[in-house]
Image (cartoon, rainbow, N blue to C red):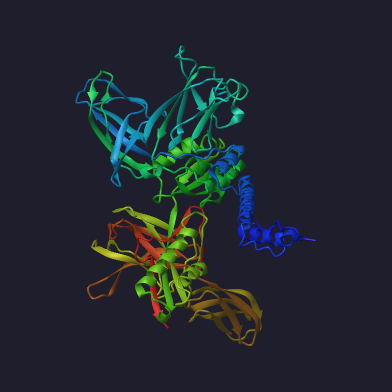
Amino acid sequence: MADRLRVTELDFDTIKSNLKTFLNQQSEFTDYDFDGAGLSVLIDLLAYNTHYNAYYLNMVANEAFLDTALLRDSAVSHAKVLNYVPHSTRAPVAYIKFVVDSTSYTPATLTLSEGFTFLSNQIDSKAYNFVLLDNGISDISVSKTGTNFIFSSIPIYEGQLISYNFTHNSASNPKQVFTIPDANIDTTTIKVTVQPSAANTASTVYTKVTDVLEVTASSEVFFLQEERNGRYQIYFGNDVVGKSLSDGAIVTATYLLTNGTAGNKANNFVATAGVTDSLGNILTNFTITPLSAAAGGADRESVDDIKYSAVAQFSAQNRLVSFKDYESYILNNYPTLESVSVWGGEDNIPPVYGKVFVSLKPYAGFYISESEKTRIIDEIITPKAIVTVKTAIVDPEYLYLVVENKVQYDPTKTTGTVTSIKNAIRSAVLGYRDSELNKFGAKFVLSKMQDTVDGTDNNAIIGSEAIVRVQKRFEPTLATSQNYTIEFNVPIHRGTITNKLTSTEFVVNDSQGVARTVILDEIPQSYSGISSINVTSPGTGYTTTPTVTITGDGTGAQAEAVIVNGSVQSVNITNRGIDYTRAVVTITGGSGYGATGDAVIDSRTGVLRTIYYDTNAERQIVDSTAGTIDYDNGIVTLNDINVRSISSDDGFIRLTIESEKGIIQSVRNTIITIDEDDPTSIVTTLETV
């Protein structure tokens, strides 16, 4: 009997081979040459048909689930079941101060209405259009101050304001669904008005549904969804959930057509038209002061992001209770953010109860502006948060890594030059940064970074070692005596003469009032002597002073016992010694027995001083107690320091010190990164073998 066809092997070549094997086993085709006959074409067709069907069914199965869906249409459809609408392109928003000069002191008012436009400076040879929107802030009036109308802070959005009209026909469109023809719209700016008929010109503004539980049969609302071709649709209720449209109703959709991320960082605006005050005067003399450059622009949500956000948003159930609720909701409503960190006030240092702390890292730049923080709290967080819980947005704290690689390689096993190998190692380290760091909650693992370095050229590189230093940057207040607390938030290495904390230069006045260009200098070994010895058991029978011996990982510590009535009453330190992290005390001799003691080592705190080098290259101390270092908690404290000026171009003082551990975990609002614009951040030394 002929073997059956094997249906579990579904690639084309295997299917074709199985078909030929099956036919060869039939008596009608004994000794038939399938490869050289016309029947071979039919076998190919059968194999192709089987392969196509197998592939199609496999893809159908993939698209049936959100986790495995590859097509945007499928992901959008699954997300809709979870009550999630993928976010559209988002328009950047900038804040400006707008002053209009009328050259007259006559009292009047001036209104800036929706649609007033501005033009930005050029980015990559292209200027961008910005517009005022009717969001309750821009459509306002101000009275004249002197000769000026002053709008102190107004938001302007990148894009063009578009209006599109639809007429409802219940016969051809019974589901009341209308497709917006433009693709790159910002759905957060959609405003929908409904006019009952051509004859009845009274219009009603409909609001977008955010929570269906709040919608009644008479609610004048509209729903939003993404259709199969990627455009967005608005649709209306059925008189059960939301009010339905009357036949012949005219629907007007007004929205912003935007360039998304391309408009980020736009600045320096000019108005494109004049304005008219309440007296009918046309005014064109404007002064526009940028308060913050355009930010917040984002591209349409990708398929992978939809698959992640839909589940997270569904879990949050449109409320802000847990940390994950905050993270998913903020990311969904402000998609220009790369990473969000949320923690409760009880976990803050110091604790602040009844408060939620949020830190935000944008894709572009390091921080978001104060105006954007206010907008996120007022428009995104507050409407959904618990009433009694307040939210504070804090800036990320960047912990910069300075990596020194020492790499051994065999030059005979590579065609690369020293420069090309160093560049490849640098790219590998930056690649590790991009994949593992640059976000909240990231963990730096030295061994994994070294694997990327060694893998740069597996043939030539024998091995490598790396020293990783951590760097904090802070901007001091000039010409003011002030205390500073710089938190590394990781354990840091106690210094030695050759490996200790360093800083960039800054200027202070010495005790004589002379300006000195100084650096911070860690005093080696100032933290590790023996402070005291506690007597844990006094012993008995001592007739002479016993010998106190101190052993440990430091050197030089000495002490003497004090005998009272044959027992050791106390132990006095005669030499504190240096470099102790642990020590053991032994008491012997004196004809007695049983006395024991424990050594108390200085806390792991170092001392910082400010120094400069004179014309003879000799070190001169300006302030011997400028600050302290808490090595265990990674905190540097500077006491009453008055910085007159700073040597660095960016106005920051940099503190750099070796990390105590090869694994560095970011906490709260700390982001671990490597500054690729700093040539000293990645240094590689090649050694030949």
Quadrant, the N terminus: bottom right
**Quick one: which residue is furthest to the right in this view?**
1
384 or 123, which lies in front? 123
**Quick one: which residue is furthest to the left in this view?**
103
Name the spot of residue 545 as percent of width and height, x first.
57, 84
Report whether 504 appears left or right of 146: right
Report whether 619 appears left or right of 537: left
Q: Could you tell me if residue 574 is visible in this image?
A: yes
Name the spot of residue 335 as percent of width and height, x first.
47, 44
Report whether 655 appears left or right of 449: left
Report whether 338 appears left or right of 273: right
Q: Could you tell me if residue 501 is visible in this image?
A: no
Quadrant, the C terminus: bottom left
Count of numbered circles in the view: 0
Name the spot of residue 211 as percent of width and height, x first.
58, 32
Image quadrant in which you'd find residue 505 = bottom left
514 or 678, which lies in front? 678
Q: Is residue 583 above or below residue 655?
A: below
Image quadrant in which you'd find residue 33 = bottom right
491 or 37, which lies in front? 37
Residue at figure coordinates x 51%, y 67% from the top left: 448
135 or 471, which lies in front? 135
Q: Is residue 50 above or below residue 135?
A: below
Name the spot of residue 446 as percent of width and height, x first.
50, 68
Q: Is residue 42 above or below residue 289?
A: below
